[in-house]
Image (spheres, rainbow, N blue to C red):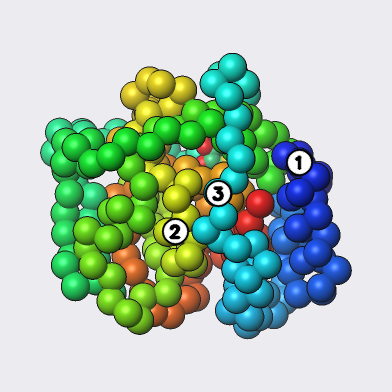
Amino acid sequence: MSIIQPDRRLLTRRRLLQLSGISGVGLALSSCGLSPSDHLNQVFEPLNQRLEELLLRPQTPVPEFPISAIEPDKLLINSFGITPQIDSQTFRLAIDGAVHQPMQISMSDIQKMPLTSMVIQHVCVEGWAAIVQWSGVRLRDLIALAQPKSEARYVYFQSADGYYESWDLASSLHPQTLMAYQKNGQPLAIENGAPLRLAAPIKLGYKQSKWVTRISLTSELMTQTGYWEDQGYEWFAGL
Ligand SMILES: Nc1nc2c(c(=O)[nH]1)N[C@H]1C(S)=C(S)[C@@H](COP(=O)(O)O)O[C@H]1N2
Ligand SMILES: [Mo]
């Protein structure tokens, strides 16, 4: 299964990773619907991650698209199960784990934080992509509020539909990694993950959890790394 290449720079980076022989990126892109039987990926993930972090320079901003490039009809709804209905008035996002200040934060408090908008490409491994504008709060600002402990290295995201994901901390602190509550200038639709979803130009679509209810920092990568990852998809899933 092929993937849309947003630009040559990304192709070059991916090539580099493939040539280095350490990347699972190629593996993931061909694994749609398959379930690799080997667990070697798991074992090598931390090594992979360190090298990928180095090669991809996770804090480097990804070039954005103009507003005129937005493709409103191209973002396909991709949900593995039921669409949870969340009351944004009573909703609280929990941030806990390896933090000094565990917290529960309301949407109105989140919406008082600085708003960041970006027009980026969303890439799904199933072979489609869409240029979308996401607006919301930087995940790094939320994580900073909870005061991460020095041992924090990974970030787990729990979603209301039972979906779960984990990211490396560096990617989570990227300036274009957002907890979005708007899409294309409108409040986020329920199907797109309202009230709050992950959005970032640095990772594949399945890393971008919708309906996030809980963010937990950890020092270790635990066995259940993600809904699709646990079925064989690559964990880092960098673009
Ligand atoms: N909670 C949750 N988040 C999810 C998914 C899901 O099934 N549940 N699907 C993922 C996949 S594979 C993609 S491509 C995007 C799709 O986002 P969209 O439905 O807003 O287009 O959501 C991601 N986040
Ligand atoms: Mo996807």
Residue displayed at 63% across by 80% down? 47
Q: How many marks?
A: 3
SS label for mark 2: helix
Q: Can you tell which of label 2 and label 3 is closer to the viewer? A: 3
Residue 217 versus residue 65: which sits nearer the camera?
Answer: 65
Give the left or right position of residue 220, taking residue 128 as reference: left
Task: Categorize mark 3 by other alpha carbons within 10 Å: few (<14), some (14-19), many (20+).
Answer: few
Choose the circle earlier in sequence order: 2 or 3.
3
**Dot 2 amino acid type:** Ser
Residue beneath disc 2: 172
Choose the circle earlier in sequence order: 3 or 1.
1
Q: Which mark is residue 7?
A: 1
Give the left or right position of residue 161, taking residue 110 as reference: right
**Farthest residue, direction left:** 90
Q: Can you tell which of label 3 and label 1 is closer to the viewer? A: 3
Question: Do callouts 3 and 1 mark residues in contact (Cβ within 8 Å)?
Answer: no
Q: Is residue 196 visible?
A: no
Residue beneath disc 3: 61
Task: Categorize mark 2 by other alpha carbons within 10 Å: few (<14), some (14-19), many (20+).
Answer: many
In three-dimensional space, the C-alpha distance between marks 2 and 1, rounded to whole angstroms, equals 23 Å
**Dot 3 amino acid type:** Pro
Residue displayed at 16% across by 41% down? 109
Q: Can you tell which of label 2 and label 1 is closer to the viewer? A: 1
SS label for mark 3: loop
Residue displayed at 16% across by 54% down? 104
Using the rendered view, name the quadrant where residue 2 is placed. Answer: top right
| Above or below, 10 relative to 7 | below
Relative image position of residue 112 (x, y in whole percent): 19, 37
